[in-house]
Image (cartoon, helix red, strand yellow):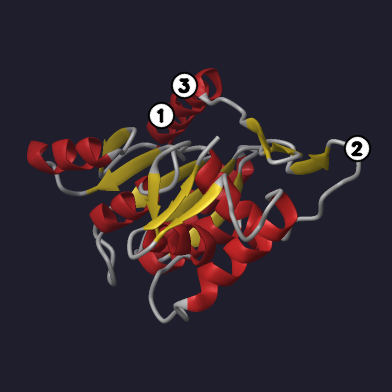
Amino acid sequence: MTRVLVVEDEQALLRALAMNLVARGYAVTEAATGTRALTALAEQKHDVVVLDLGLPDISGVEVIKAVRAYSTTPIIVLSARSDSSDKVEALDLGADDYVTKPFSMEELLARLRATARRTSSTDEDVAVTVGDTRIDLALTTATATDGTAVHLTPTEWKILDVLLRRPGKLVSGDTLLIAVRGSSEHTDPSYLRIYLAQLRRKLEPEPSRPRHLITEPGMGYRYLP
């Protein structure tokens, strides 16, 4: 079942979209603010985001930026703004499609189907070996060379999902916090350090001298294959 996150501050439209999508076999999460949308994405995997640009707390543009910092989840923008510059900005930031209000439900459904087809044809599963542990992100399994399962917490899986999909690339602490918690605000600075230390103890041959899960002081974190 395709899970869709619908982000819309107009309650009547939010409910109408949710009801129509559920009636057509989609699983739907509702969010009336950008903050709630980011939290929902951190809490659960979604296949598509349907996003209004005009939100009451943070703009839809900021939501796109935050999501694209750590995720390739498809985003379909909904907006009453018909100016082409708004469309260009949203698409340049990483939105996959743009629907201008008012729109028909059939049009939105067609865009959803097209986006899902493109995603399924290009999305690659990631399975890598970190130290002596084989990690499969699609199956969420971690298996040591002797065949025993390595237990990872949901938060540890979210951190690995971001890092392992970007081998060699620097990932900022804020990006990881948004992926894990939906926001980087009001978080103890030691939060990520604690989880990275736990991951190293479970995955690195020498946790005190990590070779794969690297901290770049003052900048962020990096996965080295």
Locate the C terminus by quadrant.
top right
Examine the rendered structure and indicate whether residue 170 appears above or below residue 156. Answer: above
Identify residue type, mark 1: Arg
Position of residue 3 in the picture relative to residue 152 (left or right): left
Callout count: 3
**Mark-to-mark CA distance, 2 and 3:** 35 Å
| Nearer to the camera, 138 or 115 | 138
Q: Looking at the image, do the residues carrying marks 2 and 3 touch, with CB atoms under 8 Å apart?
A: no
For the question of whether residue 45 can be seen, the reply is no
**Mark-to-mark CA distance, 1 and 3:** 11 Å
Locate the N terminus by quadrant.
top right
Identify residue type, mark 2: Gly
Examine the rendered structure and indicate whether residue 117 appears above or below residue 32. Answer: above
| Nearer to the camera, 10 or 220 | 220
Which label is found at residue 224? none
* Element type where label 2 sits in the image: loop
Q: Which one is closest to the eye, mark 2 or mark 3?
A: 2
Q: Which one is closest to the eye, mark 1 or mark 2?
A: 2
For the question of whether residue 8 can be seen, the reply is yes
* Element type where label 3 sits in the image: helix
Question: Which quadrant of the figure has residue 106?
Answer: top left
Which label is found at residue 147? 2
Identify residue type, mark 3: Arg
Q: Looking at the image, do the residues carrying marks 1 and 3 touch, with CB atoms under 8 Å apart?
A: no
Q: Which one is closest to the eye, mark 1 or mark 3?
A: 3
Q: Looking at the image, do the residues carrying marks 1 and 2 touch, with CB atoms under 8 Å apart?
A: no
| Nearer to the camera, 6 or 215 | 215
For mark 1, what is the residue?
A: 111
Residue at image location 43% in from the left, 48% down from the top: 70
Labels 1 and 2: the sequence-earlier one: 1
For mark 3, what is the residue?
A: 118
